[in-house]
Amino acid sequence: MSEDKTIITDEQNQPDDYEKVCYVCRRPEGKAGKMITIPGNICICNDCMQKAFDQVNNGGFPHMNFPGGSISIATPEDLASFGFGMPPQPKKVKKKKENPQPALDLKQVPPPHKIHAQLSEYVVGQERAKKIISVAVYNHYKRIANRDQEVEIEKSNMLMIGPTGSGKTYLVKTLARLLNVPLAIADATSLTEAGYIGDDIESVVSKLLAAADNDVERAETGIIFIDEIDKLARKKETNHRDVNGESVQQGLLKLLEGAEVEVPVGASSKNAMVPMTTVNTKNILFICGGAFPDLEDVIRTRLTKTSGIGFNAPLKDRFDEDGSLLRYVEMEDLRSFGMIPEFLGRLPMVYTLDPLNKEMLVKVLKEPKNAILKQYQKLLAMDEVELTFTDDAYEAIAEQALKKNTGARALRAVIDDFMLDIMYEIPKDDNIGKVVITREYIEHTGGPLIQLRGQELPLLQG
């Protein structure tokens, strides 16, 4: 038998911390029971071996000449002839330890002020959101390291509300990278009730297990970010079954609170050919995020319920020009939007992200370590060309991005538009040493300023 078809090694070569997996049904030893090792280093559970015996009794089995006269299976091809199939080698499943120790050392987790400072290197603004998420994450990992059974600390799952392009997903990605913990990002729009076409609720845990390289202990201390959570709002005025709305919220309740979930190893869906393992979500931090469109109207309606007549009476339109209405959000508004109370109760930390204004967009262009303009400067530096921007150019980019109304995502679209010709033309001429982007070039009323190598100012008009 060739090496690539070997399913699992024998007793002397088998690591102590991994379970054997049945070659036929793909169940690990913890689920199927004691394994039988047959020639060819193949492990088969008792159920599948009994099935093979039944096949022999009913119609015989080919290649029965084995050493010692014992009944065994010669090759995987024989298994295939009886309908067992020849699937690829399964993923190894780690054994569960009897007395598991905390997989995280609290000394390795930075305190909240250091988490905030590291986030500020990549994320501009959103100071309140960064402070809340820093404290919540630190308390969450203190909860994992807590061994005191008398005082049990509750989970600090979070609900992040903010307009598109305000940095919700980027904030979570940066946080997971800084903490060096596994992170899974799931899209709530693809989740459906069990039994319907789409992803089951457990698929979000499968993504986390894959991000942890199928290490269950490491996955159980990870972070799951469920994006577009507002798409699970209860549908209004509908006559059909809400299979991807309220029912999905109900299914997520057990994951948010903490439950043991059976998930496939090395696959995104459950089937008989994939080994299963159990993941406990008790110590997994869940962060839900969404733009919640039209939530401002719900908040505005609640705030303007009381109005009167007179010089000092509150006006009904006093919040019409307020662009930060989301900061006044309450649980009542989210329930009116379509989120069920049981779901909101399992997300105790609710905070909002402010929409980006012109000044914040200019900072996004300049300050982050991996700002998009710094990326373009690095690309041109590889061609030995210096790329700079005037102050008016920064403001012009921010002004055009604001018109698109998609937050920081609009910056990439604006920059890619005016940088296309530069990235195409600059490599043609080896004499170009410096390019200065001006407001006129961004507004298509002029060209960039180009300086040749070895020349001083003034720059040439591009």
Image (cartoon, rainbow, N blue to C red):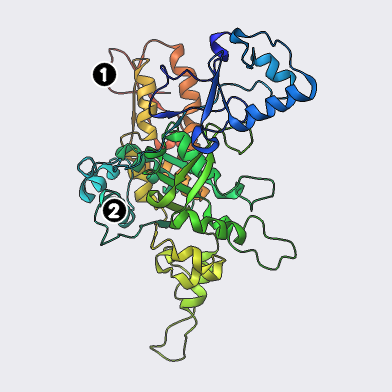
Q: Crowdedness of circle 2 by 10 Å Cα count: few (<14), some, many (20+)?
A: some
Tell me how far mark 2 sits from mark 1, CA to CA: 61 Å
| Residue at (46, 12) in percent of width and height | 428
- Is residue 293 shown to the viewer in this render? yes
Foreground disc of the pair 2, 1:
2
Is residue 379 found left or right of 24 in the rendered image?
left
Give the residue pinned by disc 2: 143
Name the image quarter holding residue 351: bottom left
Image location of residue 9, percent across then percent down: 48, 18
Task: Residue 14: give x, y in percent of width and height.
Answer: 42, 21
Residue type marked 2: Arg
Question: Residue at the location (55% across, 63% down)?
Answer: 294
Of helix, strand and loop, which one carries label 2? Answer: helix
Residue 59 as seen in the image, left or right of residue 202? right
Picture layout, residue 211 above or below residue 89 = below
Residue 407 can be seen in this image: no
Furthest-bottom residue in view? 310
Q: Earlier in the sequence, mark 2 or mark 1?
A: 2
Which is nearer the eye, 110 or 39?
Answer: 39
Q: Which residue is mark 1?
A: 456
